[in-house]
Amino acid sequence: MNNLATRVVFVLRKFFLWILIFSIVIFLASCLWSYKESPRSASVVLTFTYPNASEGLFPNGSYFNAYDIFTDDIIETGIRNAGLEETVHTGKIADEISILPRSNASLLTTQFVVTYNAKHDDQLGAVSAEGLLHSIVYAYIDHFHNTYSNDQLVLNLNVMDEEKMEYIDYVRYYNSALNQLKKYLRSQQNNNKDFVSSDGTTFQELINTLDRYRLTSLKEIEAIITERGVTQDRNAYIARLDYELWDKSNAYTLNRNMQELYNNILQDYKSELTSVVFVPALDSNREFYMSKTRVGIDTYSLNVTNYEEAAEEIKRQIDQTSQNINTIKAPANTSAAAFNAQRVDRSLAILKEQIDATMSKIRVVEKEYSKYKNHNYVTMTPVVPDFTERIGLKSAILFTVIMDVVLVTILAFLKREKKASEEVDKY
């Protein structure tokens, strides 16, 4: 061991200048190589800040797996957006992308370092490794927004079984669907009253358009249908209305019987079974006062009122249904019936075109709003290396030290062999 140390000290003293020159050359070569290769590597920090991110879930509640982020479809989209679809193969790029958790990620966010090391940079042309990586990451962010945007089932108005539908069914369907859509847009507006799309559209403008369809166009079409008895299949629709009339008559009888039952209970109710209590209430000026109520009787009185109101509403529907049946059964001029049917067909077709156009606009606005609302849910921060990182300073120092050790070891070994050879020559 002492002999080895002696030989190493001897080598360092005798060849110090050459070892120093060797070290400088190795160090500079390593730095130059790292600097040359640095454009072939790029990194970004991908940060997820939506509410479920820190719980390991996607926004829809499914389990989050960072390693499944960059699928072939997303990488292919990124390559296409960078204009490299003719020269770069998706599989090769996928092998050159790595994603690792960031060690200093906070508890409230999930951060990952995405790195791309281009092994085939000759295929990138004028696009840098950084440019391609950014294109792929942006493709993922766009995919994220499209996948986890607001549920747009309410934005699909699909009329089912059109052949079986009567004209009045179209009116009722569109009225219900548009009303539901209006409520959805109203909730979006309440979330952000200041949102304006790229073309200047607001949620209120869309709501006003839907109201115009419901309160004007549909009302006019419904009036033609009911007042002139316009049907698709006269006999089938009459049979359907007869059944509805029978069903509503039974419901009317049931509600009247329940009203009478509770009326009788109130008349026979024992006063000693009731008690008077005082409960807090608000007057018209929204000031508190103690209201006197009789426990027991109030519940039955409310039931009487409810059944009476329900019976009156059903009676109104019965009268309307009976009137519709009489209108349809009334003798009609064939040419006038055909004209009315054509008029309704034409009006419904025009309305459908208008609604379809509005729905397309709503989807665009909704997509913009979703991206606006969720734009910070996934963010990309480029990792910009400083000069020492670009030249690989730490790696260059380590590599130089290793090469110096190797060189000194070789020289020490050669020194020992030379000494051994000289001793042999003496004998």
Image: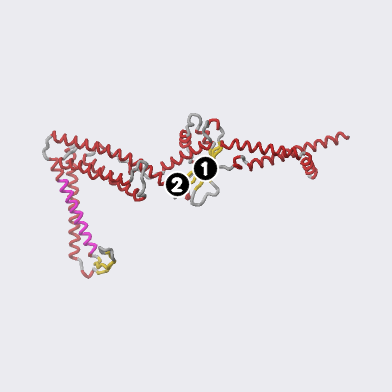
Residue on which disc 2 sits = 377
**Residue 222 quadrant:** top left
Residue closest to the far right = 427
Residue closest to the far left = 331
* Mark 2 neighbour density, 10 Å: few (under 14) some (14–19) many (20 or more): some
Name the quarter where the C terminus is drawn: top right
Residue sitting at x 50%, y 31%:
89
Q: Position of residue 163 (x, y in %)?
A: 24, 36
Q: Judge left or right: residue 32 versus residue 313.
A: right
Residue closest to the far bottom = 272
* Mark 1 neighbour density, 10 Å: few (under 14) some (14–19) many (20 or more): some
N-terminal of the pair, mark 1 or mark 2, is 2
The majority secondary structure of the magenta stretch comes to helix
**Residue 25 quadrant:** top right
Residue sitting at x 62%, y 36%:
33
Residue closest to the far top = 86
Residue on which disc 1 sits = 382
Q: Nearer the viewer, mark 1 or mark 2?
A: 1
Image: magenta residue range: 298-322
Residue type indicated by callout 1: Pro
Q: Is residue 312 magenta?
A: yes
